[in-house]
Amino acid sequence: MDVSDLIRDMNSCIPVGRRTLVEHIDSNDFSFRTKDGSVCEIGKDEIGLLSDICTEMEKMVLRLPIFISTDAGADAGAWKVDGTTESEVVSRLLGKAKFKPDTVRLHHPDMMELRRVLPNATFIVFLP
């Protein structure tokens, strides 16, 4: 098994058909489906927290769950959240400066805090 096969296997349960925060709120359905057919629930408290910190425009754009991916460009083991809206929301939530206009870099303590606050509204994706 090569690295690309391993990464594909690790990402086999990646969310598909991600909906915006406002779509979750309007439908009162806080779940998402994964590629392998599983259904995962996002906690009402997580939806409430995101709703409180997002602008009305961000609510219409922010897709859940938020992807946290490996950051191969970092010197040491790091993670990142890409996307203009996603990185802005995570940056504000953690009080962390953005690395680029559409990226916030997370080191282990940052990632652990984000996963503590949004355990089901975030999803870890492995990239080569």
Image: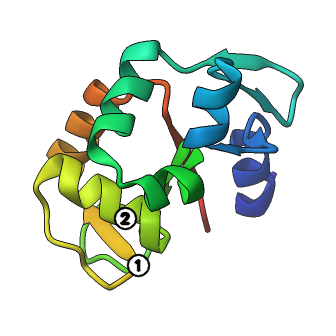
Between discs 2 and 1, the one toward the N terminus: 2
Give the amino acid at mark 1: Asp
In the rendered image, residue 110, in percent from the top left (x then y), is placed at: 19, 47
Residue beneath disc 2: 87
Residue drawn at (47%, 61%), measured in percent from left and top?
Answer: 57
Q: Horizontally, is 53 left or right of 118 in the view? A: left
Q: Which quadrant would residue 11 be assigned to in this image?
A: top right
Number of callouts: 2
Judge whether 89 appears above or below 38 on screen.
below
Viewer can see residue 78: no
For the residue carrying disc 1, how many other residues have a C-alpha within 10 Å: few (<14), some (14-19), or many (20+)? some
Look at label 2 and name its amino acid: Ser
- What residue did someone put label 1 on? 102
- Crowding around mark 2 (Cα neighbors within 10 Å: few <14, some 14 to 19, many 20+) is many
Q: Secondary structure at mark 2?
A: helix
Query: What residue lies at 58% left-to-right and 28% top-to-bottom?
Result: 25
Residue 37 shown left or right of residue 38 in the figure: right
Residue 33 badge:
none
Quadrant of the frame with the C terminus: bottom right
Residue 125 place in picture, x, y as percent? 58, 50
Q: Nearer the viewer, residue 64 or 10?
A: 64
